Image (cartoon, rainbow, N blue to C red):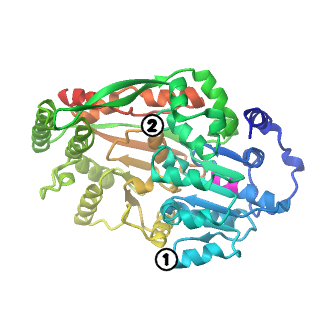
Amino acid sequence: MSYRKAAKVRQASSTLFHPDRLPEFGMTTPLKPFQVQGMFFLDEAKKCILADATGLGKSAQCIGLFQWLEHNNVEDNRWIIVAPPTTILQWVGEFEKFSSLPTPVAAVYGRQQRISAYVHEWWQFMIMSYQIMQRDWEMLSRLGIKNWVFDDAHFFRHHNTKTARVVKHLTEDAERVILTTATPMQKDPRDVHSLLEALNLNHIFGTLTGFTNHFCRIRTVRCMKRDGSSYPKEEFLGIRNTEELKRRISPFIIMRSFDEVGEELPSLTVQPVFLEMPPKQRELYNQLRRKILRAYDEGAMTDVELRNTGFQTIRKVCDGTQALGMQEDVSIKMDSAMHFIQHRLGNEKVLIYTFYKANVQTLCNRLTQAGRSDFATFTGDNTSSVYREETKKRFLDPESGLNILIGTDAIRVGLNLQSARYLLMMDLILNAQETQQLIGRIRRIGGKPHVVVYPLVTMGTIEEALFRSLSYEAALFDAIFDQNTEAFPKLSAMEIATMLRG
């Protein structure tokens, strides 16, 4: 699609339909007016990004499009949907809830069975994970599928990942490509460029180099290696030509907040809890902090090692001794979480997030020792889609007795957990949009009227410095997409070292 045609589609999207005169087209659960508007935008644009806020029904709008095309006897209405594993059964449920279309085939079985299913023509819709897509991409590319949906498309926001390369190969000759994500930009505008490449819009936005030179302020820094040599690395400083960037992206993306569509979200309170480490945890923090800085200053630790191993080590100390693999359990965060559960939770449900799997086990041990059995875990190790779906259903059921759900990043994407009133964040997420995504798990239409988020922050540590940093990353997102978010910025090795020096 040319830029001029796309701009006309975008401009007309608010008047593409009249809800009162919309014919019945087979939906078993009616779409809301703003969802019908989005559906028609997807139909007209053909290749675009659906970036509505979490909870506004992006999958329902896609299913509405499928049903609309079927109603109008569109010749090729065969689709492959690629989604995170946690959302596959949710997509199946949405099909059954909203449409009279055939339930999609879920490609979750063995490779030989998948290949057999691929070559048969009996299915109209197939859904698979990004991992399956990567494994089977050569077979998929020979099927000639012209219609694709990529759910949570931020998974390929980096240009050079295998996922990005496979997606761009599969969509090269596609007629319709829909990317759904509430977070089209997480770090800088180059994230959006990678998504636009999947839509085959290179003729409009140019190469990554040209896009970067025109819209990004970049500086080159020298990064040190262990042998004392250095290598150049680009660091993103900010955007330029902001209004032009907004204008050029706008025709290919539909992005609406709850306020814009007249939907009311539960009210939100973010209440950080600043914690003082006990002496033993503080002493360990100071020892490792000095050790890491000494290694970095003496050249024994490179910039990359500081940003990865050093940074993660010092964050684990903030969580407690067991996060580092020690036998002794000393953690002010665990103490605080247990106090909250035992004395403040009452009959309400709570979602507990942590970045580290070791923390999940530690918290489970503490709950068991306290005589609690009303908890479950949700991590990357829980690969069974049946377990995931059953756990979610139990957590949503007020009579199930499951009040505490503890999870890692596996809970951050694609789950509707609106039965929870509280979100306890054991670890900070260093990204504005990912933090918003996590909060969106419990802050949803039909959920509790008021939700509370408690980020746990250890005082006098790198966490406090992170928490109090200005949300520069969020400001970039807000400038381009006219949103209002909060964030933690991406940090350079120099900034991490500065924070450690205190």
The amino acid on which the numbered mark 2 sits, given as a three-letter code, is Ala
Dominant SS type (magenta): helix
Instruction: Identify the residue at image location x=69%, y=54%.
Output: 62
Callout 2: SS: helix
Viewer-proximal residue among 234 and 243: 234
The reply, left or right, for residue 78 in relation to residue 219 is right
* Residue 184 visible to the viewer: no
Return the residue at label 1: 110
With respect to residue 165, does 137 lie above or below? Answer: below
Q: How many residues crowd around disc 1 within 10 Å: few (fewer than 14), some, or many (20 or more)? A: few
Per the model, the C-alpha gap separating discs 2 and 1 is: 37 Å
The reply, left or right, for residue 375 in relation to residue 252 is left
Viewer-proximal residue among 346 and 90: 90
Residue 465 image point, x, y percent: 28, 30
The reply, left or right, for residue 455 in relation to residue 439 is left
When asked about the image quadrant of residue 89, the answer is: bottom right
Residues rendered magenta in the picture: 58-62
Q: Which mark is residue 432?
A: 2
